[in-house]
Image (cartoon, helix red, strand yellow):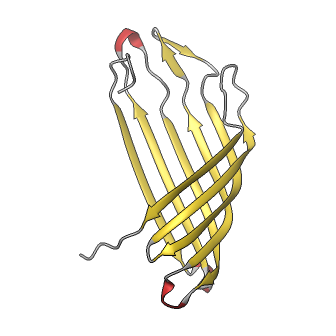
Amino acid sequence: MQPGSGSTDLFLAANGTYTGLFNVRRLVADEDFHALLRSQGAQATRLGSEIESRFWLSYRPYESKGGKHEWFVGPVITWLHSQDDRLGGFTQRGSGGDLLLAGITTYVGVHPGVHVWLGMDWDAAHSTGTSFMPVRRHISFGITQQFRLHL
């Protein structure tokens, strides 16, 4: 829910990883896709829906025996599309736009399936809407736990 707007938002995501790209065992491609679809709320208010696609191409220069420890590093490119907002029933032209971020991300495997990561992105290109305020630089970090589904 958007605070005070009364709308309901739908969030969809899809992620995928392919190891061994171009028959190079240590080359990994990751795609992360998100869509945030927003509905109209109270007082004819509707914030613009958003679509984000992130592609990361990484190389694994280090991998210990058994895969207990590993290190990945590589470039990342992110595209973000935001639709214009509607406030009071009127479209706020220029409030949405497109943003292209380029950067680098690194992952360190500290335990099998557990990675600590750090990423930095910079604004490579963006729309010039009147009130579109894109991110100029972005730093992210985290810890991930990987798992496998046995079906």
As drawn, the residue found furthest toward the left would be 151
Question: What residue appears at the point 36 percent right and 70 percent down from the top-left corner?
Answer: 147
- Nearest to the observer: residue 69 or residue 135: 69
Left or right placement of residue 76 versus residue 70 in this view: right
- In terms of depth relative to the viewer, which is nearer, 114 or 29? 114
Q: Quadrant of the C terminus?
A: bottom left
Question: Residue 31, percent across and down?
Answer: 53, 60
Residue closest to the eye, 81 or 62: 62
Residue 74, image quadrant = bottom right
Most distant residue in the front direction: 110
Residue 5 placed where, x, y %?
38, 17
Q: Residue visible at 58% across and 38% down?
A: 81
Q: Going 32% across and 28% down the picture, which residue do you hit?
A: 8
* 89 is higher (above) or lower (below) than 82: above
Question: Looking at the picture, how far across and down is residue 112, in whole percent?
Answer: 44, 77
Q: Quadrant of residue 89?
A: top left
Q: Nearer the viewer, residue 7 or 139?
A: 139
Q: Residue at x 35, y 27 (%)?
A: 1
Left or right side of 86 for 11: left
41 versus 112 height, above or below: above
- Residue that lies at the very extreme toward the bottom in this rendered image: 65
- Number of marks in the image? 0
- Residue 126 drawn above or below residue 120: above
- Which residue in the rendered view is the most extreme toward the right? 124
Residue 101 in picture, x, y percent from top left: 69, 47
**Measured along the vertical axis of the image, is residue 9 above or below residue 67?**
above
Q: Does 125 sit left or right of 132 as displayed?
A: right
Q: Quadrant of residue 25?
A: bottom right
Q: Is residue 47 left or right of residue 103?
A: left
